[in-house]
Image (cartoon, grey):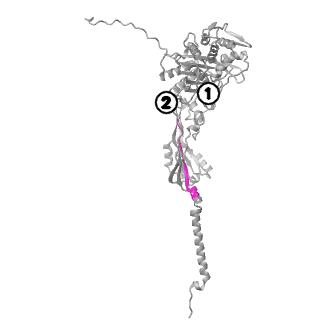
Amino acid sequence: MISIKPNGSLYPWRFRLVIALLGLFCVAIGYRIVELHVLDEGFLKDQGDKRSVRHVTIPAHRGQITDRHGEPLAVSTPVVTLWANPTQLLGHEERWAELAKALGADPKTFRERLKANADKEFIYLRRRMTPQDGEAVMALKVPGVYSIEEYRRFYPAGEVAAHLVGFTNVDEAGQEGLELAYDQWLQGVPGKRQVLQDRRGRLIKDVQVVSNARPGNELRLSVDLRLQYIAHRELRDALKNFGAKAGSVVLVDVRSGEVLAMANHPSYNPNNRANLKPDMMRNRALIDVFEPGSPIKTFTVAAALMSGRYQPNTVMDTRPGSMRVATMTVRDIHNYGVLDVTGVIVKSSNVGVAKMTLDIGAEPLYNLLQQLGLGEYTGLGFPGESVGRLPSRRKWPQVETATLSYGYGLSVTATQLAQAYAALGNGGRRVPLSLLKVDQAPAGEQVIPSEVSQQILDMLRATVDGQGGTGSRARVPGYQVGGKTGTVHKTLASGGYAKDRYRSVFAGIAPISNPRFAAVVVIDEPSKGQYYGGLVAAPVFGEVMSGALRLLNVTPDDLPALQQVELPPLEKEGSRG
């Protein structure tokens, strides 16, 4: 009888081998489990997240820019940007025509663009669409088309405040004006949102907000939008009426140094820059420099009064209307004869101011102009601002001394000149200019004695209201106004002066009894045969100043005295019937 042994007894080595292999497999699998779940958990989780977890940017809107009363000058509105994954769109060519039509694109151009970017996974289809238009495209549910939320900058005042506010690019980064100067202040901080997506980029789940978006800071300007509109309108009309090339208006609060209006022409619409030309973007009030001419005579006379050698009633002989200074002849328009110092300002006598400056020397006038801020940055921090030119000499030649006295040989911006006149209106105290709203007026620096500044103000009033004054068209009914006209020959690139090209200038202050505002008007190249500052620039000053005085409720200081009306005596009781 044959006995059968168990397999393990018959082939002991095979049994042990199978057990060993099974044990080895168990150890290997256990090690792999430990490796995947313990040792390499972070790496594998990270690799998995890279294939499915995405951080989507939460856009942050840019800070608002407003005028001093909170009226918006620049705001960010939500828009929709559409993008596509061409690798997905290629499989749905039958829907390209439908998509192109919804996007407002030419079907042929759209098709060529998709094919040219077939190897890419991201292209913009259209940026900054209105939410309604974006939703209409997304409602087509074309595979491979996605949307993201962005913001678009909008400028409610349009061209009225364009040069001052500036604009941003498509990514809301400041490019011009205060948008550029305060770009970091206005920029928001985008947030992050964690989402799950499949390998084709489709949203599976919105997981969590990693960080919230922080909006940009608000910027409140010193400008009063109402006055800005007035300055813009009056300047535009003046350019049209006199066929001028360009112009600027600057209106300043003499006490706080706040710029209440700053208008330039030609202008542009920052909301539609399709036909924008470079020279339209220039803030001429801060960038363009020019020889100021006669408005400098105001400070020439101030320097003469400060020297102690002259008084408002000091007699000046300007006959015969010209004088020889070294190799140059200084001329007046007419032979004004014998004038007092006030008359020199009222008649705008070149001979009179030249004689004064040759007497006291150029240094006192130079020092005063420097203290008033000419030849220096205004401190406004505006991009591209010009500093102008105030010549400095160790020894002043007579010719340069004479020309400096009536505003030639130096260059200024309209804003610098406005700052100088603002100091005169502030009792001779210069305060720093500001394009931002000021809560408390700065103390400033006394550069002209208060009694001298008052004497000059009286002279400037005579220039506007006095007999034969050159600035009569700057009058504002009900208010005492003072100012100085200027008609300046433009310089040529080759040197010298153009005979038939001018700048018309008016700089002034109101009301004279208690000054609140200073303004400067510059009209570049009036071309209809009328170019005198008193004719072209003074009326603009009058209209802008009139608007400022009335809108800001400044008490009139030049009302006619009430006529005394003699009333009949009261009847005694019982005198009737």
* Residue 549 relative to residue 529: left or right: left
The quarter in which the N terminus is drawn is bottom right
| Type of amino acid at the residue the image marks with label 1 | Thr
The residue identified by callout 1 is: 378
Where residue 448 sits in the image (x, y, percent)?
60, 18
Where residue 332 sits in the image (x, y, percent)?
65, 11
Where residue 451 sits in the image (x, y, percent)?
58, 15
Q: Say the numbered circle drawn on residue 79.
A: none
Where residue 56 sits in the image (x, y, percent)?
54, 49
Compared with 409, 67 (above or below) is: below
The residue identified by callout 2 is: 69
Residue 59 within the magenta-colored segment of the rendering: yes
Q: Magenta segment range?
A: 45-64
| Type of amino acid at the residue the image marks with label 2 | His
The quarter in which the C terminus is drawn is top left
Closer to the eye: label 1 or 2? 1
Residue 365 within the magenta-colored segment of the rendering: no
